[in-house]
Amino acid sequence: EQPGPVLQVLAEAAPHLQSLSICGCNLDAASLLQLGRALAPSQLRGIGVSNNPGLDTQTWAGFWELLPRSILKWDFGDNELEDESLPLLMRAVGRGSAVSELLLDGNNLEDIGPLLPAVSATSGLTELDVGDNDLTDVQVQALAAVLPGSCLTTLVLGRNAITDAGAVPLVAVLPQTRLQSLYLDSTKVGDAALDALAQVLAGSQLEELHLDETQITDAGVLRFC
């Protein structure tokens, strides 16, 4: 089924919408830009176009630039976005007064440098999901360096090629952060990260920790307990 009639309905409803999520609808470039034009005059607070791979970076950039500055929540997961798209997305995000949620899981990102200023801001971003990308320890170390003092309460890093070399510096700064939920599942994190966590957990605000499908051993768990 062609998305045209649905987009027409959305265009008519746009002035009344607070949030919109479109998942797996196989929008082509023309349809995505049509959607952007329909949403441009709205006061939308949240936007999600996810599981819509196959579009080039310039199409995404054109769509993001059309979106209203009122948006606080951005969800563009599972779109096969490449590194070159991130500065363009963050430029659009930066046009608004603040961003509270940024969900970019399931893409092909290797360099998250362009979003670090949003993390380090003292007000705004509370949830960041960059799970299931191509991040390495270097990126996690850079992220850890900007976390102290940030507003982030939920951080998803699972399903990335992360080892203790990235996780230990991240864990070390937890007492200086507001993080309550941390996802490191399906990574190569091991006992060293868990040992580091044991030293700082009491001084942190962490309430939820995901370490399933990692390289943590029974011995490491026993020491932690």
Image: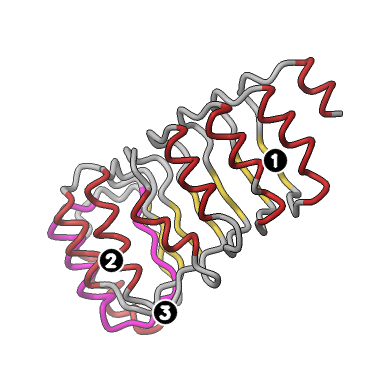
Q: What is the spatial separation of the Cα atoms under label 2 and label 1, in whole angstroms?
A: 31 Å
Residue 99 quadrant: bottom left
Q: What is the spatial separation of the Cα atoms under label 2 and label 3, in whole angstroms?
A: 12 Å
Q: Amino acid at mark 2?
A: Arg
Q: Amino acid at mark 3?
A: Ser
- Which residue is drawn at the image coordinates 82% and 28% (left, top)? 224
Q: Amino acid at mark 1?
A: Leu
Which callout, 3 or 1, points at the residue further toward the start of the chain? 3
Q: Determine which residue is flagged by label 2.
A: 91
- Which residue is drawn at the image coordinates 50% and 30% (left, top)? 162
The x and y percentages for residue 93 are: 35, 68
Q: Determine which residue is flagged by label 3.
A: 97
Which span of residues is magenta-colored? 27-50
Residue 73 quadrant: bottom left
Q: Tell me whether the residue at label 3 lies in contact with that at label 1, contact meaning CB atoms closer than 8 angstroms.
A: no
Q: Secondary structure at mark 3?
A: loop
The x and y percentages for residue 94 are: 34, 71
Q: Describe the colour scheme in one phrase.
A: secondary structure
Q: Determine which residue is flagged by label 1.
A: 209
Residue 195 vertical position relative to residue 92 in the rendered view, above or below: above
77 with respect to 32 (left or right): right
